[in-house]
Structure formats: C-alpha cells, structure tokens
Amino acid sequence: MAQLIGGITTSHVPAIGRAIAKNLQDDPYWKPFFDGFAPVHRWLAQARPDVLVVFYNDHGLNFFLDKMPTFAIGAAPVYTTGDEGWGIPALPSFDGDLDLSWHLIDALVADGFDLTTCQEMRVDHAVSLPMALLWPDQNWPVKIVPVCINTVQFPLPSAQRCYALGEAIGRAIGRWDSDRRVAVLGTGGLSHQLDGTRAGFINKDFDLQFMESIIHDPTWATQFSIKQLVEKAGTQGVELLMWLATRGALGALVRCVHRNYHLPISNTASGLMLLEPSA
Ligand code: DHB
Ligand code: FE
C-alpha cells in the first residue's frame, strides 16, 4: 500500500512569484521567508515523495463566481498555470497522477464527500508558488493531485468539514494499492485581509496558537465557525482551512520537523510547517 510520509503547510502570496523572478531571495525583506524553506529542501531530498496531494484555494483562475464548487479535485493528466493578473511569470506545468486522482474520487464519494471532478483544471499561485518554494529549480520531481476548497464565495465549508475531508483523504491514501510515497501540501493563510476596513489585518497571537494546535491539538480550530475564523484571521486568513485538511490527512499524532513564521510578506503573515505522521 502507498505510504503517507509527511505534510507541509505554507502561505502562498503572489509577491513571492515576483521575488523569485527577480532573484530577491537574499534581499533583507525576503531572506527570513526564503531561509525558512532550507530544512524543507533537506527533508524532501531525503524523503523523496513521488506524488503530492495539494489542498489549495483557487482565486478566480479556474473557477469563477458563476460556478463555485465547495470541494473540487483534479483528475487531469496535466495542470497548467495561467496569467492571473499579478505579473508572475508562468511556471512549468504539473503532471497529474490519474491513478491516485480516481482512487481518491472513488473513496471520497463513497465516504460522503460529493466533490466536483475536473478532468481539465488550471492551477493558480496557490499551487505554483508553494511548489516553486519546495523545488526552486522548478523541475518538479513529483506528480500532483490538486484538491480545491472554496474560500472565495460564501458559504464556505466549515473548519470541521475541511478537517474531515483531510481525514478521508488520509485514509484513502493508506488504502491506495501502490508503492508510491505520498505527501500532502496545504497552502494559504496565515492571517491576512486584503479588502474592506480591516485591510492589512494580521493576528500574530492567533496564528501562533493555531500553529501550535496543528501539532498538539489538531481539531482546536474546528470549534470556530467560518465567521469566527474570519474575525480571528481575516477574510483571506480563512485559507487556513487548507492547513486543517492537511493536518486531518496525517492522522492522530504528528511530529513537527520544522516550522517558520514571518511577517509581513505583502499583506500576509506567512507560516510554514513540516510534519511527519507519528505512530
Ligand atoms: C496576498 C495573499 C494571498 O493569499 C493571495 O491569494 C493574494 C495576495 C497578499 O498578501 O498580497
Ligand atoms: Fe490566497
């Protein structure tokens, strides 16, 4: 059976794409952020995942307000990036793992998660930039299965439901008849708000408590409604739902291999965690 070897959670901010394009990794503004990924690079070189399930939220590239699935999963042979209007150069496309996609779709629908299945799907900065942070040469050594969670148009799925989705995906990975090494990646958050009277809002106390809970008390944030999460983390900080899905996939106990927290990156408090399932 397939092995779930670890999980990574990270923020995704379009400005990271411009920093990469301009080689600003050692610039004083960017260094504390990019340096946070060095231990993740070392882990990836050793752990050598074959395939990544990526929890992310689309921001209008693939889904728009006219058709907004709550949960969507890719079942495409290839995922291309596109011009989102942020001025980020296009990144190399990602190969899909069709076998894992359909295995997950079968397992999730059987488990009561009625996802939208996408045999064509473009992925935005919420997939491409975290991938470029993990593999700076952009020569992706993994296939991916993107899982998109709506954080753009209300109503959003609850924190509890996103955690349960992650749990179902974790169980399904464990039952995948394959020798592949699977990792999960969740992108978004932490606290930020791009619009309205609270634009620029960041909540460091909440972010640090949330990161701590991800290790020791993973369902802590599922006590909060979406409205409460927006109050605590900002309208876009609610992207932390991806972290909950990722954590749900990893099972009851995890070991935190590495974490970093740095603010601000653009309008965002950026967080990074690397977790391994622990027996
Ligand atoms: C920013 C953060 C995001 O999560 C995003 O999707 C777009 C922009 C920002 O901080 O600029
Ligand atoms: Fe975002």
Image (tube, grey):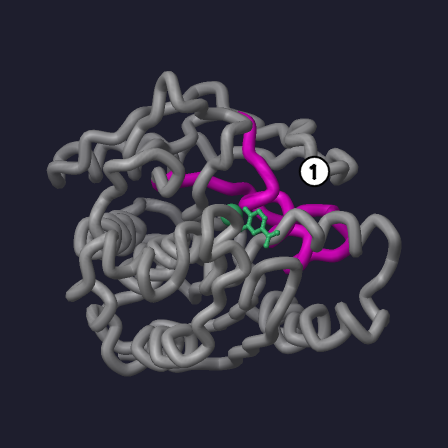
Residue depicted at x 49% and y 72%: 274
Residue depicted at x 68% and y 52%: 132
Q: Nearer the viewer, residue 65 or 131?
A: 65
> In the image, 124: left or right of 107?
right
Q: Quarter holding the C terminus?
A: bottom left
Dot 1 crowding, Cα within 10 Å, few <14, some 14–19, many 20+? few
Report whether the residue tagged 1 is closer than 8 Å to ligand 1.
Answer: yes
Residue depicted at x 72% and y 36%: 92
Residue marked by disc 1:
86
* Residue 48 in view of the camera: yes
Q: Name the quadrant containing residue 212.
A: bottom left
Q: Name the quadrant containing residue 224.
A: bottom left
Measured as percent of width and height from the top left, residue 242 is found at 38, 54
Q: Nearer the viewer, residue 198 or 142?
A: 198
Q: Nearer the viewer, residue 57 or 169?
A: 57
Measured as percent of width and height from the top left, residue 130 is found at 60, 53
Q: Which residues are magenta?
A: 122-149
Q: Nearer the viewer, residue 266 or 160?
A: 266
Measured as percent of width and height from the top left, residue 101 is found at 38, 34
* Residue 186 in view of the camera: no
> In the image, 88: left or right of 134?
right
Q: Is residue 75 above or below residue 25?
A: above
Q: Is residue 221 above or below residue 249?
A: below
Which secondary structure, mark 1?
loop
- Within the magenta stretch, is there residue 251? no
- Within the magenta stretch, is there residue 124? yes
Amino acid type for the residue under numbered disc 1? Trp
Measured as percent of width and height from the top left, residue 82 is found at 66, 28
> In the image, 132: left or right of 248?
right
Q: Is residue 272 above or below residue 154?
A: below
